[in-house]
Image (tube, helix red, strand yellow):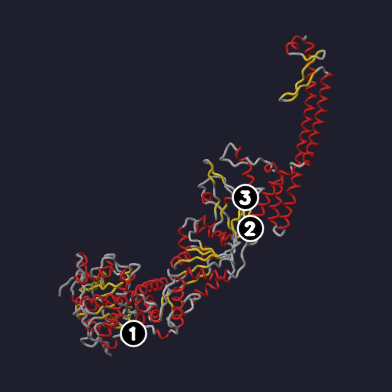
Amino acid sequence: MGLESSRLDPEKLFKKCDKDLFEFETTENVPPLEGIIGQERAVRAMDFGLKINRHGYNIFMTGLTGTGKISYARSVIEEAAGKEAVPDDWCYLYNFKDPGAPLALNLPAGSGSVFVRNIDRLLDDFKEVIPKTFKTEDYERQKAVLFKDFQEKRSSLMEELNKVALEYGFVIKRSGTGFLSVPTKEGKELSEEEYNQLDPKEREELEQKSTDVQIKAMDVLRRIQNEEKKLKDAVRELEHKTGLHAVGPLIEGLKEEYKDFPLALQYLEDLQEDVLENLSDFKEDDDDEEKNPFPWFKSRGQETATKYKVNLVVDNKETKGAPVIVESNPTYYNLIGRVEYENRMGMVTTDFTMIKGGALHRANGGYLILQAKDILLNFQSWEVLKRVLKTKEIRIETIGEQYALITMASLKPKAIPLSVKVVLIGNPMLYHLLYRLDDDFRKLFKIKVDFDVEMTRSLDNMSRMANFVSTNCHEEGLKHFDRSGVGRIVEHSSRLAEHQDKMTTCFNDIVEVIYEADTWAEQEGAPYVAASHVEKAIAEKTFRSDKYEKKLLELVAEGHILLELEGAKEGQINGLSIIDLGDYAFARPSRITSAVYLGRRGIVNIERESKMSGRIHDKGVLIISGYLGQKYAQDFPLTVSASLCFEQAYNGIEGDSASSAELYALLSSISGLPLKQGLAVTGSVNQKGEIQPVGGITRKIEGFFAACKLAGLSGQQGVLIPHQNITNLMLNKEVVEAVKEGVFHIYAVKTVDEGMELLTSVSAGEKNKDGFYPSGTVNYLVEKKLREYNDFFNRQPDKQDFEEETKNNGREGEILQ
């Protein structure tokens, strides 16, 4: 194969964007972007995920960072939510039957705040009306009648008792514990001394009479207590009747307003009953709190004011359509809410007004957007999210209670029914880990919205890229781009995508260039951003990050990193690898060497032996062994020992993109043919000798070009690449110009034979009809050497002893001919 047939023309090294394709002069006249560019699969999946309303059809948006997932999610979800109904408000109320389990009440959107005001006004009316009602003449008169009746009955009973006592010769006197019967004689009360002077028989008679009087007194006391109980019941009934007369009309008005809400009606009935049972709370003095001797306890007035409040945890009064909530800190309590506590003089207290709603409460009836990484990193957040999605209800619980870490009384609010569509945003690794390791995940997140990292470089997408640029210019107040500027953005997008016919969808990288190009245009005083400003922005952005690349080139120039760029050497070739620093990636030219010697050990990968290589690189070396065997050892065993090494590589090697270079070095060592040192090689190889495409092809070429430029371009330097990688070339202007001037070359090869011909200027050779390679060809020389190695072992008188000896001393194959 000739050099010219595989050498690439400059036109194939970079795909220029023709600015004449655009119908606008500047982006001032370009409408802003609607939707998202180049994500048809994701758009269709998202559209379906938002339309389907079935259990488990939550959404997981996956893709690399910077592909526009978050901004797209918010825009498309807000658009869909705007067409939906506004969900109910939710309140927590005091549970009069079970105070430890506050009630949950839902009302139509906007009605929650109205309900709060209604209850507050109702309580204010109670505080005003109830005291007045109990100060009316009618109430006082009825109460006085009850007390008068009681006094008359008690007086009658006391007269009856006194009459009986006088008949027995006693006088009745009241004491703190009841009645005392005091004996009399001739109408005069006896003192204790006089009583003791009586004769025993007389005292015995008086004691007997005293007992009879005490029995009668106990009966009267019991009847008086019954009358007191009747009085209390009558007063209570009067107060209840009077209170109902005051409270009833007020509550009946609210009942009429909330007649279509059974829970609200039941609450109002319970509230009315509780108010009537605790009317005294509304008749207390205004300075009740000042009289409280223990300020760390709530006064009766404070407790009453708290008990009848309404805790509005979800207020959709201002919401338009279904709510769209983006929770940036999805902790356990931020998701499901919490019961807060108040510290009063070292005593922790709480009540239902301290219940706070979480993101799930606010998103109920709408959409909740979460970052998958954030929710997985927060303790118990992922578990509680799955629980509420499975049970379809939000139940506020403390983590301490679940793990028995805290044993203290707390509220257990009633659960709130949940209807929400959760949208998780994460990278592909998280999606696949969850899908494989969490059985609940595949049941709860059935919609995968997968964002691509690239899109076709069609006229439509290029035009939409102009819309994207226009959007940023309008929203951020940037200078507008002319056609050349947009064209350069398209070209840079293709470079980021590493494909001439595609553009990147990592819009964050594009936005950075847009911002920075605007700054350079501003400094220059240009009215619009042109291609030169975009070029400047890209160059400066590279300059800020290429320190280590420049340091590496300095080491090459100073000779600390050995790299030969001229002449020819046997068993030595220049390979290309990528160093990725995260924000910047660049190529490092490396010397790859091969050593071949007698033995049966096969190919030794020095990186593998020193545990500095990855599994993919090790696989590439094993493939080389397979290639040698199938191509050259069909009628004799492959008997060879060889070693391969990346010289001056100390950080480990991974990937198979250098496997073709390693094979070329090995074939050079076996055949004795030197390889051109001005050529670098990248590409993987299979067992059939076909060169396979690799990644990072543009940066690899540019990295080797930079090294050649330091040493001086001779016109003989260049890079061998897989022919499939031609469409991946988006080389910078300097390399393209060098190729155009003929001082640097890019060769595209399909097979190992083509590569060897380019590297050695010797024909690879194909087998003739007799099954032999033409004399002097690369394959002839390789096969010849391998046969010689095999014949050498066949001539050994005691091959087993030879193998055992070389194995024991660790010098297998080190035989000098």
Q: Which residue is mark 1?
A: 12
Q: Are marks 3 and 2 in contact (CB under 8 Å)?
A: no
Q: Amino acid at mark 3?
A: Ala
> Where on the picture, by quarter, is residue 618?
bottom left
Label number found at residue 112: 2
Q: CA distance from mark 3 to mark 2?
A: 20 Å
Location of the N terminus by quadrant is bottom left
Closer to the eye: label 2 or 1: 2
Q: Which residue is mark 3?
A: 101
Residue at position x 69%, y 47% from top? 126
* Residue 422 percent across, percent down from the top left: 54, 65
Q: Amino acid at mark 1?
A: Lys
Residue 266 sits above or below residue 681 on the image? above
- Is disc 3 placed on a helix, strand or loop? loop
Q: Which badge, 2 or 1, comes first in the chain's sequence?
A: 1
Closer to the eye: label 3 or 2: 2
